[in-house]
Amino acid sequence: MSRAFADISFTPSVKAAQSLYGSREDNLGFELVDEKRDHLLQRDIEFLQARDSFYQATVSENDWPYVQHRGGPAGFLQVFDAKTIGYADFSGNAQYLSVGNLFANDRISLILIDYARRRRMKIWGRARIVHENEQAELIARLTMPAYRARVERAVIIAVEAVEWNCPQHITPRFSEREVQGMMAELLEENQLLKKQLQQLQQLQQLRHLKAAG
């Protein structure tokens, strides 16, 4: 449980909804827990660095939320310290909805999911946009040379709350790399079984020859 998560999310209307549907008492624990959790722990950092995608939400000037998928090679979302994360914003469709929203309102939230292991983490924070002519060394740090995509800017997020979400309704899915890893184990086991079968057949043939002689 995270107190920082409750401080941000449990607005009066949310508390009213909890009371209406009978969960207000259960959710009080989030508000009373000693651990604020406004920073990343080591397990959070390891989880973040292994992700190759996440979903981010921003809010427009006309109060409409906008959710966008961000992706790249595993590790494109980097951790600078326990309170700061960032990623290279690769070129896309040039609509700049998330960027434009952040120019007006720096609030941002992320949902990061490990489908294969049914784990989900949420982050709330404040984002700032950084361009290469402002901090070239920062852009260079976030650039991934092996990934052929142009970096237009960096998005740096100051973490304000972290929470691990219930995995109950996450449907397991596997990436191509994960499937290849599982298949490699099966193929190796299959080759071993074939070899054992071949040895058994050779042994049986030898016994038949001895019996016939």
Image: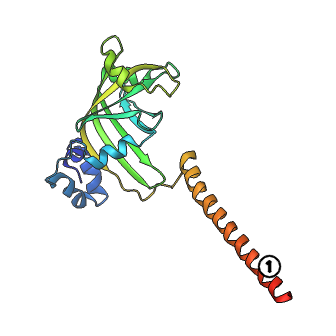
Confirm whether residue 61 shows in the render.
Answer: no
Q: Residue at x 23, y 43 (%)?
A: 11
The total of numbered circles placed on residues is: 1
Residue at the extreme front of the image, as rendered: 213
Confirm whether residue 37 shows in the render.
Answer: yes
Residue at the extreme right of the image, as rendered: 212
The x, y position of residue 19, in whole percent, is: 25, 56
Viewer-proximal residue, 187 or 101? 187
> Where is mark 1, residue-wise?
205
The x, y position of residue 82, in whole percent, is: 23, 39
188 to 158, vertically: above or below: below
Label 1: few (<14), some (14–19) or many (≥20) C-alpha neighbours in 10 Å:
few
Q: Residue at x 42, y 59 (%)?
A: 168
Viewer-proximal residue, 41 or 60? 41
39 to 170, vertically: above or below: above
Q: Quadrant of residue 195?
A: bottom right
The x, y position of residue 112, in whole percent, is: 40, 43
Q: Quadrant of residue 211?
A: bottom right
Secondary structure of the residue carrying numbered label 1: helix
Q: Is residue 4 left or right of residue 202?
A: left
Q: Is residue 21 left or right of residue 66?
A: left
Viewer-proximal residue, 34 or 204? 204
Q: Residue at x 30, y 49 (%)?
A: 43
**In which quadrant of the rendered image does the C terminus lie?**
bottom right
**In which quadrant of the rendered image does the N terminus lie?**
bottom left
The x, y position of residue 89, in whole percent, is: 42, 25
134 to 43, vertically: above or below: above
Q: Residue at x 19, y 58 (%)?
A: 29
| Color theme of the render | rainbow
* Kind of residue sitting beneath label 1: Gln
Q: Quadrant of residue 199?
A: bottom right
